[in-house]
Amino acid sequence: MDDKETGDIKQLVDNAGIPENHSPAGIQSSGEPTQKPGKTSGAKVVNMIEDNAYRLAFERKINETEDFDKLIFGLAADVQKSALRKASKENLLKQIAKKAKVSLEALRQSMPMDNEGGYERGRVNGGFLPYEILGNQFYVFDEKGRRPLSNFVAHIAEEIIYDTGAEAETLFRIEGRLSDETPLPPIEVSASRFLGMGWVSGEWGARPLVHAGNSIKDHLRAAIQGLVPCERRRTVYGHTGWRKLGEDWFFLHGGGAIGADGYLQDAVEVRPGDGNMRRYRFDAASDGDLCADIRSSLLLLDISTSNPALGVVLLAAVYRSPLGEAAPIDHGVFLAGQTGSRKSEAAAMAMAHFGRGFNARNFPANWDDTESDLEAKSHGAKDCLFVVDDFKPRGASNDVYKLHMKADRLFRSVGNQSGRGRRTSDMRQRPSYHPRGLVISTGEDIPRGASLRARLALVELSAKDVDNGILSELQQAAREGALERAMGCFLVWLAKDMDEWKREIPGALRASRDEAIKEGFAKAHPRASDIYASLLIGLGLFFKFAAEAGAITEEDKATQMEACQGILKDLIAAQCDLQADQDEVLQFLGYLKSCLNAGLCHFGDSFKQGAPIEHPNFWGWRVIPGSDGLQDIEKPQGELIGWVDSVRVYLDGNAAFAAAQEMAKATGDNLAITQRSLWARMGERGLLLDVKTENGKIRYSSQKVVAGVKRRAYIMSRKTLEDGTE
């Protein structure tokens, strides 16, 4: 015990009424045991009044001391070295252990002991942990004598299990102080980083010093880990959404959890992530009017009277996203419109259902984030909306290409419900991350690719679609927490029967999908019927909840559900046009016609290789008037890519494909298909003629005599190019 603390104890004893020059029996001023005259060496005479005074003084000091290290390495050591009765020592040590929140056995093991040299030495295991703390510094005792390890002390105050849902990482919460009593800020260090000790300077800066020498870092690690055993352990969840804890389901969020019994703010600790990910948070339920809150959420349906699909899709997405635990969501939503169309403000009203901190300037992500960051954050936003704002290709062609590839990767991982496989340095497989909620994106352009667009519910906005009056009402409701409270109560409602929802919802989705296929409006892509069913189930459960809460009548429920269902059907049917824009076969034919119009290629007559008899201008030939009475000249433009007769077109596969690719690049696009796949798709659609099977293998090209020479060509009808019909 240092001089200052000894003085404090003596002062407390003085205040207890003990004369300054009077020490308890068996204690000298130096703290060493004494022997009473006339007694044998093993006997002690205890003055109970003095013993009680010192015990009371120690108790006061324990009550005043908040620092963990001072309790363990200061007061506990003083109690142990004192000549108090064994029962008094035991009682005081129990008080110290209780205040330090450690067991009495752990306290005894961690407590320094007095050696012959007068130093304090930790004794978790005296034979294998030869370390001590002296003057807030670690020392090691070995064959080289006493050596300093550091100019600070530290201990693991808590072990944290950070559970992301895909993997669990162990973190150590470390506290410490410098030798001059300066406290060091508590830090969290992963177990893997802890071993290397590089975190000392990385987290605490230049002041903490690890001494030089062989094995010093190993000794310091063992001293920090061993002198004060860590007995505190807790789990922190690194994601939002549903989690079964014990026998009950809870929806995790940044402020705690929501279960069947309501809000639990302190029972569960959740860290969805940094930055705007912290805004996934439901504040404790207030005395708000539930029916009014639900009606505020229903205002989304009125956000655009000229484009009702916007409100229907947003409301459906909001209440579909918490159902991801029952049925994974394999599609996204994309809001496309020019700048100023208020698409971001509309998306923000949907996001505000998951935390009033979300607005048009604070989304979970944007398209400037890296691919890995998008993967990690979308994985953490389980069973929630996840908005990625501002898809706007710009810059050089390579920058535009990279942005489209980033979008392709994100939405494909949504549609496939799988992420990129990863390996550790020793080739062990690591968990993959993919979006586990419903991804909404806003942008001025739509990502390329027919397959990618098939994974999206696309809503295109004009500059005047959003109703500013309704938008203002929604923004006010978001700021007041009405949208957040409506979603919170919906989650409580779901939590009561979550196991039943997990059984029922997949079947309901299949039934709605089969209905869409039967009615025939979802022809754009096989996934279109699944998107329709997914959005419809979100609307259906929300209207059911609203009716049970008394916010709408059963008649209103049926009327609104019917209206929303019709709007969804129209939206899904309209996806055909957006799909056609990215259909590789139609793109190929369109690029060929553009090449002909631009004079970049031409077709020759299949018999004489000159200009075709009919419509030579269409097939890439230009008439040059003859001068001085000479005959007009028909001149071919660009490269020859095939031949034509009165009814058929004979394509030179390589030349035609290369011409289409060049035109695509010239327009800033890319024909994202190989030749083999292109001809196969054209053959499947019946666009290629004379397709034959030879030796069990389909041949899409045929050998024909063209201009007196036998050639292999892909044969189409003239009308396919002339009329643009399949």
Image: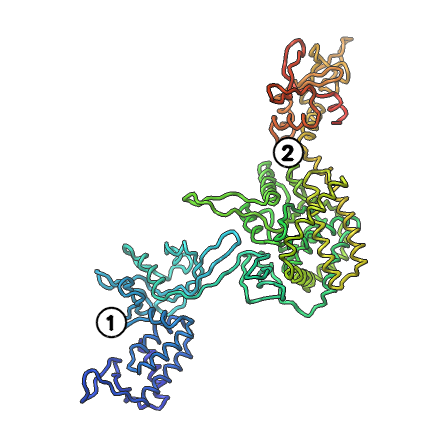
Q: Secondary structure at mark 1?
A: loop
Does residue 525 sit above or below 270 in this rendering? above
On the picture, is 382 further left or further right than 9?
Answer: right
Q: Are marks 1 and 2 in contact (CB under 8 Å)?
A: no
**Label placed on residue 600:** none
| 1 vs 2, front mark | 1
| Mark 1 and mark 2: Cα distance apart in space | 80 Å
Q: Dot 1 corresponds to which residue?
A: 115
Q: Secondary structure at mark 2?
A: loop
On the picture, is 460 further left or further right than 503?
Answer: right
The residue at 79%/49% (across/down) is 306
Q: Dot 2 corresponds to which residue?
A: 669
Binning the other alpha carbons within 10 Å of mark 1 as few (below 14), some (14 to 19) or many (20 upward) gives few
**Given the image, on which type of amino acid does mark 2 rest?**
Asp
* Pick the front one: 382 or 619: 382
**Mark before the other along the chain sequence, 1 or 2:** 1
Binning the other alpha carbons within 10 Å of mark 2 as few (below 14), some (14 to 19) or many (20 upward) gives some
**Residue 411, image x and y in percent?**
61, 43
Does residue 636 sit above or below 347 in this rendering? above
* Pick the front one: 638 or 427: 427
Q: Is residue 338 visible?
A: no
**Residue 102, image x and y in percent?**
40, 70
**Residue 719, image x and y in percent?**
76, 22
The residue at 74%/60% (across/down) is 546
**Given the image, on which type of amino acid does mark 1 rest?**
Asn
On the image, which quarter does residue 424 sit in? Answer: top left
The residue at 24%/71% (across/down) is 115
Does residue 534 sit above or below 32 in this rendering? above
**Residue 615, image x and y in percent?**
77, 18
On the image, which quarter does residue 601 sit in? Answer: top right
* Pick the front one: 222 or 249: 249
